[in-house]
């Protein structure tokens, strides 16, 4: 008989759906000691929250996250709200002794993130941040290949995350659906939203980044704010490109924008080592490209590994070899790993402390974008 882990989820938007789906599926595919129970969902609009609860099977609804956290029948708080609410909710949840699953980026900035780390560590509560791309099987396989030393010494890390949805100057900023354009709610633009994913993956695959130099731009300087109705300055970065040096001596280039016409969510990375290179593309997420210079020269070339076999990461839990899975499964994998960690009483990354490292890189990138100088990451 599995042990229940009563979930209280705050926010029911894009991530609220992705997480709820993962909680519902995880025990069907993974053999786990714990079982998430959809106890309560919290959002400010009761009718909408109730409709969400009915669709996804939550037992109850709250409209004030403080009430949700105070409930003794909630074991774990899942933070799916805009970024500016992560800190206050996480610190309150830690003080109440709750397990915490927090969406990325961890916080608005490093200072907030430090406070959050201290709070969860003082309370001794299990915690994780939803940098889900680590758990796309092809990305996990990339980690395995690097850790096995197949690439040899790594020289280059190259990542991009491109979108095109904010090009229109008529798009307002702020409020439901558009909080990402409002610096007060989001903290930053593409750096915290998109590059944070690229940076988390990079730190995980290739170790710490020591220093960065960045270029940022806000193409549309003013937009009407949905909440105030007034035209206000846009304070987020619309685009960001930065160079970095990893501690292992390799060089990095990262680029992100919401102005790359034709790209909806093109996250790609390529890593070049002395023996081999790997490349991954979110649009083809079940494939990992691999080139090994040690292959016989007459057959040497890029191979496209279809990551669907039972001996490849996570795939034994799904269908038969050759049948692929998708984006939503990365969240199922994260829940599965987290629940296994709870059962074994072992932290599962990325913890708040791991995510703080990504936050430090983001802050350094934004600072460099302003100063136009190289910034060292402490
Ligand atoms: N891991 C990923 O790939 C990924 C993808 C998208 C978003 N995110 C992160 O997830 C978080 C949420 O993003 P989203 O895309 O789901 O946003 P969203 O706008 O779709 O949903 C946000 C939700 O928060 C709720 N909310 C806002 N203020 C609230 C309050 N005071 N009390 C209770 N609920 C409140 C809103 O009603 C809404 O349901 C952000 O931190 C974002 O960066 C992560």
Image (tube, rainbow, N blue to C red):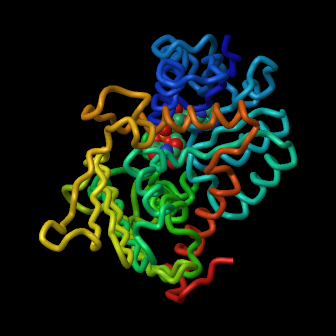
Percent from the top left, x then y, of residue 237?
44, 66
On screen, 112 above or below 372?
Answer: above
Percent from the top left, x then y, of residue 190?
43, 61
Location of residue 289 by image quarter: bottom left
Q: Residue furthest front?
A: 296
On screen, 248 above or below 78?
Answer: below
Left or right: where does residue 67 sit relative to residue 369?
A: right
- Name the residue located 80 percent from the left edge and 25 percent from the top edge: 70
| Figure disc tally | 0
Location of residue 220 by image quarter: bottom left
Quadrant for the N terminus in the image? top right
User: Is residue 228 visible to the viewer in this orientation of the structure?
Assistant: no
Percent from the top left, x then y, of residue 319?
33, 26
Q: Residue furthest left?
A: 298
On screen, 92 above or below 30?
Answer: below
- Name the residue located 40 percent from the left edge and 72 percent from the top edge: 157
Left or right: where does residue 204 sit relative to residue 230?
A: right
Left or right: where does residue 111 sit relative to residue 124?
A: left
Q: Residue furthest bottom?
A: 373
Quadrant for the C terminus in the image? bottom right
Location of residue 345 by image quarter: top right
- Name the residue located 64 percent from the left edge and 33 percent from the top edge: 340
User: Is residue 326 visible to the viewer in this orientation of the structure?
Assistant: yes
Identify which residue, 239 or 244, lies in the foreground.
244
Identify which residue, 100 or 335, lies in the foreground.
335
- Name the residue located 48 percent from the left edge and 18 percent from the top edge: 28
Q: Residue furthest right?
A: 122
Percent from the top left, x then y, of residue 146?
46, 63
Identify which residue, 248 or 100, lies in the foreground.
248
On screen, 47 above or below 346?
Answer: above
């Amino acid at each position: 008989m599995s042990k229940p882990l009563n979930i209280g989820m705050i926010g029911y938007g894009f991530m609220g759906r992705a997480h709820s789906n993962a909680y519902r599926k995880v025990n069907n595919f993974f053999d786990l000691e714990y079982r998430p129970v959809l106890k309560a969902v919290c959002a400010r609009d009761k009718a909408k929250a109730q409709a969400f609860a009915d669709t996804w099977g939550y037992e109850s609804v709250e409209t004030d996250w403080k009430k949700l956290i105070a409930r003794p029948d909630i074991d774990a708080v899942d933070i799916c709200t805009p970024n500016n609410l992560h800190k206050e909710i996480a610190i309150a949840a830690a003080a109440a002794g709750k397990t915490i699953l927090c969406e990325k980026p961890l916080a608005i900035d490093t200072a907030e993130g430090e406070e959050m780390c201290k709070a969860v560590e003082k309370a001794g509560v299990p915690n994780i941040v939803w940098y889900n791309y680590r758990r796309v099987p092809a990305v996990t396989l990339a980690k395995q290949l690097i850790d096995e030393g197949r690439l040899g010494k790594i020289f280059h890390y190259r990542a991009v995350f491109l979108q095109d949805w904010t090009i229109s100057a008529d798009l307002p900023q702020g409020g439901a659906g558009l909080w990402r354009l409002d610096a007060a709610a989001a903290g930053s633009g593409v750096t915290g939203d998109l590059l944070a994913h690229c940076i988390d993956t990079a730190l995980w695959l290739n170790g710490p980044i020591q220093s960065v130099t960045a270029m940022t731009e806000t193409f549309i300087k003013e937009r009407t704010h949905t909440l105030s109705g007034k035209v206000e300055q846009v304070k987020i970065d619309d685009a960001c490109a930065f160079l970095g040096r990893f501690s292992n001596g390799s060089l990095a280039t990262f680029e992100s924008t919401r102005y790359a016409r034709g790209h909806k969510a093109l996250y790609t990375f390529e890593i070049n080592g002395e023996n081999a290179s790997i490349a991954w593309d979110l649009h083809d997420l079940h494939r990992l490209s691999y080139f090994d210079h040690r292959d016989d020269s007459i057959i040497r070339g890029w191979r496209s590994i279809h990551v669907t076999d039972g001996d490849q990461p996570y795939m034994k839990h799904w269908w038969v070899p050759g049948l692929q899975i998708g984006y939503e499964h990365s969240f199922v994998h994260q829940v599965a790993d987290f629940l296994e960690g709870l059962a074994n009483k072992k932290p599962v990354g990325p913890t708040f402390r791991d995510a703080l490292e990504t936050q430090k890189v983001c802050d350094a990138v934004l600072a460099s974008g302003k100063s136009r100088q190289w910034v060292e990451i402490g």
